[in-house]
Amino acid sequence: MFEKQKYPIIGRSSLLEISRSHSLRCDSKQSENRFVELDSLLLDRETVYLGEFLPDPLTKGSQPVYLQEGEGIPVINTLSIQKMAINVNDCRYISEDDFQLLNPNRVLKRNDVLLTMDGGTSIGKPALFELEGEYTVDSHVAILRPKRISPKALVFLLASPIGQLQFQRFESGASGQTAVTEEDLRRFVIPKSAIAKLEEYVDELGNERRRIESERSKLNQAEDEMWASFTQKVIEQP
């Protein structure tokens, strides 16, 4: 499903089809099989815009002046967000004084949804903020505070193929410096019928992800042990 089509391609589209997109995008990328397939799946379904669940403007961090040594307040950046999780070890730090000067909206609260909005392959990485202590984000990470759906459900929607395909479709800009705008994000579509069952789906998927992560950890440990055994045999060889 949603197989990526290789470039270059030539796309043919009617003005009616182009007009269905608020951005009026008509570049050949829009004719890739994965986007055409997504449209066909959603065409006969009633959909809602993601913006209906984001009543407040998105908050983006500022470009911080980082401490060169020592620790202050951690700043979550694009590198910090990986696989729907936050790796604190990849955070950099700003001073307590700079943190106190931040707009209160830029101070992270539990259950904030963090989303990378630019940076080429880094676009569209979501994570749920559940850490203790004081944190903020840099200028490449947006803070979303949804209403009428849970923050966890929003994270799973954005991380799903339906969300990721829309990031890939709407990104624009020079190579390696692409971005998705807030307006585009608000125009992401979701099947309306799924909203009522969304929390149930998320709970099921969360349980399955934990099971897979547990299996992956066991496989990683088995691989490490395999290489350790190989190395030991090589070293002990007379």
Image (tube, grey):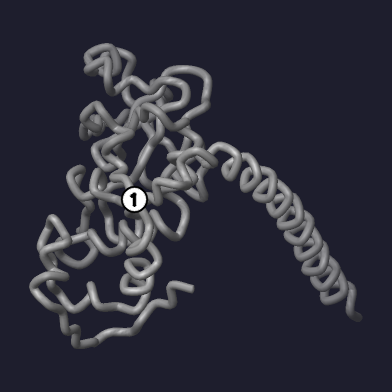
Residue neighbourhood size for the residue with mark 1, other residues' Cα within 10 Å, grouped as few (<14), some (14–19), many (≥20) = some
Front residue (pair 81, 209)? 209
Work out whether 142 lies above or below 103. below
Give the residue number, with chain letter if any, for mark 1.
47
The residue that appears at 33% across and 20% down in the rendered structure is 107
- Where is residue 24 drawn, in percent x and y? 10, 63
Secondary structure at numbered mark 1? strand
Which amino acid type corresponds to the residue marked 1 in the rendered image?
Thr
Which corner quadrant of the image does residue 80 belong to? top left
Which corner quadrant of the image does residue 177 belong to? bottom left
Q: Can residue 125 be seen here? A: no
Q: Is the C terminus in the top left, top right, bottom left or bottom right quadrant?
A: bottom right
- Where is residue 43 drawn, in percent x and y? 33, 64
The residue that appears at 39% across and 54% down in the rendered structure is 163
On the rendered structure, is 34 left or right of 236?
left
Front residue (pair 65, 114)? 114
On the rendered structure, is 46 left or right of 63?
right
Q: Can residue 222 be seen here? A: yes
The residue that appears at 52% across and 41% down in the rendered structure is 198
- Where is residue 90 drawn, in percent x and y? 46, 41
The residue that appears at 58% across and 45% down in the rendered structure is 201
- Where is residue 110 drawn, in percent x and y? 47, 22
